[in-house]
Every structure is written in structure tokens, then in C-alpha cells.
Image (spheres, rainbow, N blue to C red):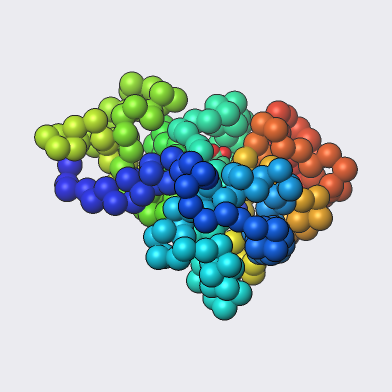
């Protein structure tokens, strides 16, 4: 295994640890109100009044990193450079929790139902495009890449296949790009897949493994705020937006589902997380499985 730099991994790990909110600046009413509005407007995340302690605790680390001693100064920074600070703010307040093959029934559905269908319909060549929207540290797109690579190889398919993986959080994307994971976090990956798709670290990298270059090739990792303009054209055959919209308010979800419909081929698929639903929010899709939606019209 080549020498990996683990800055991204360490950063994401430490990102998860929350600081006690007791020793440090206090988040006052006006600053909390501003932060709630800002986060709702720019990240789509609806923070309830009861989240003040949580926000204060999570933002303390960011304040310290910036050398700031008051939340007021941080709010000023957001006002003067909203784009520049957005990713770090989102990283601090939202959760990046993810794992390989999380909600495994979705991967089974791709392997057993969708890939045979796609291989049939695209057998004369063509492109297969998937999007992991809110990919966090990369486990979701890489697990998809494993499934795709295995099935395509088994059928000797040369289908032009790519997975776009996007997220708002620069820290999470740094880990995804690095593609180095702790073996402890591979509970969802079978021994066979661990052998096949990871390069084990040795010496000081013992306990770590790097994702196989073949999977890295299939996955394109890009920063993207889902609430902003999307530079890509699409269309996609399937979009995975799992455990992302859970924090969004209803109008934001409604608008996002409409935009996803516009990005999918007719009959394309949208996967949501286990506690997310499109119920009452979109007529563009029909529910065809456990949090699996199909775009109408094919
Ligand atoms: C809990 S993780 C989900 C990761 C993966 N999809 C899964 O299900 O395991 C949620 C991710 O959504 C990202 N996210 C939240 N709001 C976003 C937004 N407005 N635009 C893009 N990504 C966003 C967060 O940065 C975080 O990495």
C-alpha cells in the first residue's frame, strides 16, 4: 500500500467528538436566531429551538480553529463570506455518520433487480450513471462501486459506468477522496470483499485499508450544496440520497424531490434513508420497495 496521508481521516474522526459546551463563549439569543435562519436558508437544515446547546457545543471547535472568542464574531464571518464558511458550518452541525452497506437491502436491490435490468436495456453500449447525493466520507459510493464492479465483471460488460459522489462537507469529502478506512469500521463488508477491494496497510498503517484503485476510478467526488445550482447535466439512472433530507424542512424536501425527478431518466430510481419518506411531497415518484422510489413515466 502506498503511503496514505491520514489528515482527512483524522479530521473526520475528531469532527465527530463533541466538545462540552460549558467552558467557552455562550451562544446568545440573537446569534442563535441568525444561525438558525442562515442554516435553514443555505443548508436546508431546520434547527429547533431546543438545539441551542448542541449548536453551541459543536461550533466551539470551529470558533477555536478560527481564533474567535465570541459567537457574534462567527456570525459576522458568515454574513461577510457565506460561501466560504458554509461547508465548515454544515460539517459542524450536521452528522456525517455513515457505513459500508448501510441499509443493505438497497444494495441487494441494485445487484439483483436493477443491474440485470440495466444490462439488458443497455446491452448495445451506453452509459450507466449513479449519484450518491450526500455521500459523507465515501462509504456509500464505494459500496455501490463494489456491487457494480462485481456484477459488470461477472457479465463481461463494458458498460460505461460512473458514480458521482457529492457532499457539502469539505472534511467528509477529504476522507472520501483519500479512501482510507479503519478496519474497525468495516463491519458491513464481507471478508471476501475486504480482501478483494481493499489494500491493507502495514507497519504504522496497520489497522487501516485503502480502497482499491478500480473502485476509486468509478467514483467521482465533488463538493455540492444540494440547495444550490447543480452544474451537472445528468441524466442519472439512480440517485441515492439517504439520511440527508431528514434534517430538511418540508418545502426544501419538496423542491429537492422535484429537482431529482428532473435529473433522472424516465423510470429512474431514487433511494431514501430508512426514516425518510416522500409521502405527500411528490407526485413524480411511486414507492416500489422499502424507501425505494421509481420515477413515473416509463
Ligand atoms: C448522515 S450523512 C449520510 C451519508 C450516506 N448517504 C448514508 O446514508 O450513510 C448526511 C450527509 O449529508 C450531507 N448534507 C447535509 N446537508 C447537505 C446539503 N445541503 N448539501 C449537500 N450535502 C448535505 C452532510 O454533510 C452529511 O455528510
Task: Please identify the residue farthest to the left as the structure is shown.
Answer: 203
Q: How many marks?
A: 0
Task: Please identify the residue farthest to the top as the structure is shown.
Answer: 191
Q: Is residue 230 above or below residue 245?
A: below
Q: Is residue 143 above or below residue 44?
A: above
Question: Is residue 105 toward the left or the right of residue 36 in the image?
Answer: left
Residue shown at 50%/71% (left/top)? 84
Q: Is residue 229 above or below residue 180?
A: below
Query: Residue 273: x and y, percent?
Result: 65, 36
Q: Is residue 119 above or below residue 161?
A: above
Query: Residue 133: x and y, percent?
Result: 58, 51
Residue shown at 70%/33% (left/top)? 275
Towards the viewer: 49 or 139:
49
Q: Can residue 106 be seen at all in this image of the molecule?
A: yes
Towards the viewer: 142 or 254:
254
Query: Residue 54: x and y, percent?
Result: 59, 44
Residue shown at 70%/63% (left/top)? 30
Query: Residue 56: x and y, percent?
Result: 57, 50
Rendered image quadrant of residue 123? top right
Question: Is residue 91 toward the left or the right of residue 259 in the image?
Answer: left
Residue shown at 51%/38% (left/top)? 97
Task: Please identify the residue farthest to the bottom as the structure is shown.
Answer: 80
Towards the viewer: 63 or 117:
63
Towards the viewer: 195 or 150:
195
Quarter the N terminus occupies: top left
Q: Can residue 224 be seen at all in this image of the molecule?
A: no
Rendered image quadrant of residue 185? top left
Amino acid at each position: 500500500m502506498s503511503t496514505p496521508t491520514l489528515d482527512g481521516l483524522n479530521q473526520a474522526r475528531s469532527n465527530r467528538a463533541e466538545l462540552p459546551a460549558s467552558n467557552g463563549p455562550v451562544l446568545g439569543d440573537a446569534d442563535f436566531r441568525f444561525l438558525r435562519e442562515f442554516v435553514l436558508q443555505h443548508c436546508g437544515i431546520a434547527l429547533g429551538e431546543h438545539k441551542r446547546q448542541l449548536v453551541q457545543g459543536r461550533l466551539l471547535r470551529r470558533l477555536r480553529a478560527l481564533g474567535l472568542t465570541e459567537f457574534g464574531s462567527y456570525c459576522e464571518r458568515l454574513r461577510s463570506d457565506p460561501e466560504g464558511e458554509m461547508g465548515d458550518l454544515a460539517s459542524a452541525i450536521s452528522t456525517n455518520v455513515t457505513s459500508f452497506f448501510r441499509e443493505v437491502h438497497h444494495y441487494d436491490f441494485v445487484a439483483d433487480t436493477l443491474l440485470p435490468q440495466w444490462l439488458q436495456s443497455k446491452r448495445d453500449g451506453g452509459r450507466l450513471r449513479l449519484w450518491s447525493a450526500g455521500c459523507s466520507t465515501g462509504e456509500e459510493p464505494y459500496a455501490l462501486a463494489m456491487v457494480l464492479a462485481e456484477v459488470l465483471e461477472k457479465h463481461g460488460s463494458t458498460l460505461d459506468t460512473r458514480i458521482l459522489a457529492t457532499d457539502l462537507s469539505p472534511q467528509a469529502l477529504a476522507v472520501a477522496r483519500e479512501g482510507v478506512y479503519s478496519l474497525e469500521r468495516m463491519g458491513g463488508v464481507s471478508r471476501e470483499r475486504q480482501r478483494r477491494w481493499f489494500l491493507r496497510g502495514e507497519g504504522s498503517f496497520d489497522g487501516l485499508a485503502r480502497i482499491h484503485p478500480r473502485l476509486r476510478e468509478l467514483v467521482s467526488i465533488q463538493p455540492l450544496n444540494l440547495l444550490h445550482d447543480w452544474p451537472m447535466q445528468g441524466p442519472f439512472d439512480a440517485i441515492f440520497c439517504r439520511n440527508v433530507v431528514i434534517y430538511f424542512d418540508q418545502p426544501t424536501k419538496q423542491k429537492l424531490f422535484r429537482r431529482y425527478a428532473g435529473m433522472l431518466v424516465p423510470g429512474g430510481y431514487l433511494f431514501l434513508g430508512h426514516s425518510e419518506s416522500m409521502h405527500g411531497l411528490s407526485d413524480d415518484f411511486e414507492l416500489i420497495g422499502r424507501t425505494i422510489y421509481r420515477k413515473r413515466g416509463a
